[in-house]
Image (spheres, grey):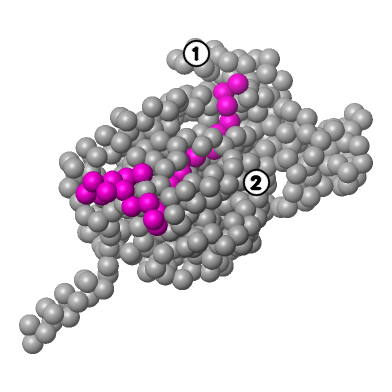
Amino acid sequence: MKQITFIIGFLALLALGPSCNQGNSSVRQPAVAGGFYPASRDELRGMIDGFLSRVQEERIEGRVYAILCPHAGYQFSGQVAAYSFKQLADRHYDTVIIIGPSHHYWVDGASVGDWDYYETPLGKVKVDRKLAKKIRDYNQKLVFSPAAHEREHSVEVEVPFLQRVLKGFQLVPIVMGKPTLENCHILSQAILRAIGDRRVLLVASSDMSHYPSYENARQVDEQTLSAIGSLDPERVFRSDREILSQGVPNLECTLCGLGPVATVMMVAKEMGAEKAKVLHYANSGDVAVKGVKNRGRVVGYGAVAFYTPKTQTKGGKPMDLTDEEKAELLRIARTTLEHILRKESPPEFEPKSERLREKRGVFVTLTNQGRLRGCIGHFPADTPLYKIVSQMAIAAATQDYRFYYNPVTFEELDQIKIEISILSPMKKVTDVNQIRMGVDGIYIRQGNRAGTFLPQVATETGWSREEFLSHCCQDKAGLPPDCWKKGAEIYTYTATVFHE
């Protein structure tokens, strides 16, 4: 009987596949280590570092929002992938969202991973389960199907590279199924509404043409990369259909990760990416196996970065602050409130960071157990950041007309939560489709009336773009709800948002 029990237990462990519980933590264990890449920690680290050391591409100066990387065995595609990952060195991201195609399991929409950790031979990466849940909660097509991840390599092979070039990041692994524009829109909107003020990197995991000849692959992949470079996801879909209709011998697909690539492009554009740069291209016919390059049937590999150049980020770039700088501003706001609500003069502050002396516009929002208790802002960048935060904290607690008869009191201060939104300069828009929901705040002005919504309002309400504009006209500016269609000036801005 004991022997039967042991056998049943052993079979149950096998059924778990690469996912298992270690202690009280759930861990997605590596499925293709020793196949697609080395299972030895030292060998894997040495191989990746070697790939990275051979990258000669110049570093992109600006903000990189997303990258495209291949996901074949490292022997074939690792050097191409290194061109994308090398661009991430010395950058910081709170969370990396990897979207890869499903090769083994049918998924209509996408499966968003839900473990505590994702493991490779280089160690464990914490999964951002809160963000993953927010993404899944957006639509019924977004689920967690463990079987979709158990044998899937498209996400896994990207993680060791990230472990070598980034520090302190969390992960959201997504395996995408049916590649339709509708599914891409669903997943992209889910991501945009979920990320909030996190500094997020998107990784599209995809190889390119499958199984044409070497020369045909280069021609097909050049056309596909041109479509990707346009930053137009619909053009990528059109290009895919056009190429497949040409009857290229042995061509099975242009992008095995068509859905992931289009989704990442959608998100990157909404986040602010203005350019796509092809960093490198090769195919399996460029790699010799046992001294022979097989160029009869090949697979293509491309590396692309989606970014905003440094010279173009000044108009609408959020302000990047360290955790320490954010904490110092929150301390300044709370200390100010403590003094003011005790009827004392606000204290003088001497910030440790010089960046807190930069001049920026700011909003300070106060809530008590989720209920708004005051929100006041100042748009002009004419006052040092640490001073305007102190001033707006006072204004939010004492000058918000909505709470004239019920202002914030010292007795409730322990229950008050402070949120700070640091604003970028505003820029005028002529096409409302340029407004990036969940990323851009809006400022609408007509005559002597004006009103604004911070970027996070779109995320919190779930409004469409039209609802966002109409509510701002009516609720904030006191104008007709359709004034945005009838001559009102519309401006956008971004915000770095953080709270206690």
Percent x, y of residue 72: 36, 52
Note whether residue 215 is visible.
yes
Residue at coordinates 57% horizontally, 27% vertically from top-left? 309
Percent x, y of residue 68: 47, 44
Residue at coordinates 54% horizontally, 66% vertically from top-left? 178
Q: Which residue is mark 2?
A: 232
Is residue 305 one of those drawn in magenta? yes
Q: Residues within 10 Å of mark 2 (few under 14, many from 20)?
A: some
- Give the quarter of the image for residue 403: top right
Is residue 3 one of those drawn in magenta? no
Among numbered discs 1 and 2, the one appearing first in the sequence: 2
Three-letter code, disc 2: Asp
Q: Which one is nearer the viewer's eye here, 207 or 201? A: 207
Residue at coordinates 92% horizontally, 41% vertically from top-left? 486
Label 1, label 2: how far apart the Cα atoms are: 40 Å
Q: Which residue is mark 1?
A: 354
Residue at coordinates 27% horizontally, 63% vertically from top-left? 18
Q: Which residues are magenta?
A: 286-311
